[in-house]
Image: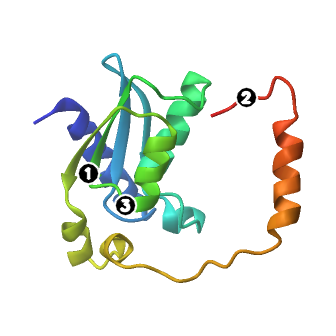
Amino acid sequence: MNKYMEIALQEAKNGINAGHGGPFGCVVVKNGEIVGRGHNEVIRRNDPTCHGEVMAIRDACRNLNSFDLSGCELYTTAEPCPMCFGAILWANIRKVYYGCTISDTDKLGFRDEIFCTSSFDIKTEMDRKECLGLFEEYKAIKDRKSY
């Protein structure tokens, strides 16, 4: 068994035993060193964004003092949901290793699969002109950081 996946599994078990959430644990690795770890804390924090991958990414960012995790790899007990995959891409993580599939998590009663296979018509454009004005103000700031 891969040593990083073994640690991700232990993270998930710690979260399950503490009643924090589902069986999802994760570690972020850079140059062979674990720089972030986390497990699902949705129930503990009453926050639907506290998936294992997001918690590990937040931990890695704190530990590296950077929002850019270029050069990092992520090991997680389950295939990332669309939200987590978006966070992984935004963090510039180069490689993801996962254990169970989204189909496996669906069998436990989690809703990941519906977010991958369905389209939701819940968006409506509103006040675009005013929001574009804000974007122009931001664009005019000198020495702003892009990410």
User: Which residue is pictured at 82% across the width and 56% down the height?
Assistant: 132
For the residues marked 3 and 2, what is the alpha-carbon distance in whole angstroms?
28 Å
User: Which residue is pictured at 37% across the width and 61% down the height?
Assistant: 81
In the image, farthest residue toward the front: 129
Q: Mark 2 points at which residue?
A: 145
Q: Is mark 2 on a helix, strand or loop?
A: loop
The local crowd at label 2, few if under 14, some if 14 to 19, many if 20 or more residues have their Cα within 10 Å, is few
Nearest to the observer: residue 73 or residue 118: 118
In the image, farthest residue toward the top: 31
Provide residue 143's location: percent of width, then percent of height.
82, 23
Q: Name the residue under label 1.
A: 77
For the residues marked 1 and 2, what is the alpha-carbon distance in whole angstroms?
33 Å
Are discs 1 and 2 less than 8 Å apart at CB? no
Amino acid type at image mark 1: Thr
Nearest to the observer: residue 81 or residue 122: 122
User: Which residue is pictured at 71% across the width and 74% down the height?
Assistant: 125
Q: What element carries label 3?
A: loop
Provide residue 109's location: percent of width, then percent of height.
29, 79
Depth-wise, is mark 1 or mark 2 nearer the camera? 2
Depth-wise, is mark 3 or mark 2 nearer the camera? 2
Which dot marks residue 81? 3
Q: Examine the rendered structure and indicate whether residue 6 appears above or below residue 130.
A: above
Q: Is mark 1 on a helix, strand or loop?
A: strand
The local crowd at label 1, few if under 14, some if 14 to 19, many if 20 or more residues have their Cα within 10 Å, is many
Nearest to the observer: residue 15 or residue 67: 67
Provide residue 101's location: percent of width, then percent of height.
20, 60
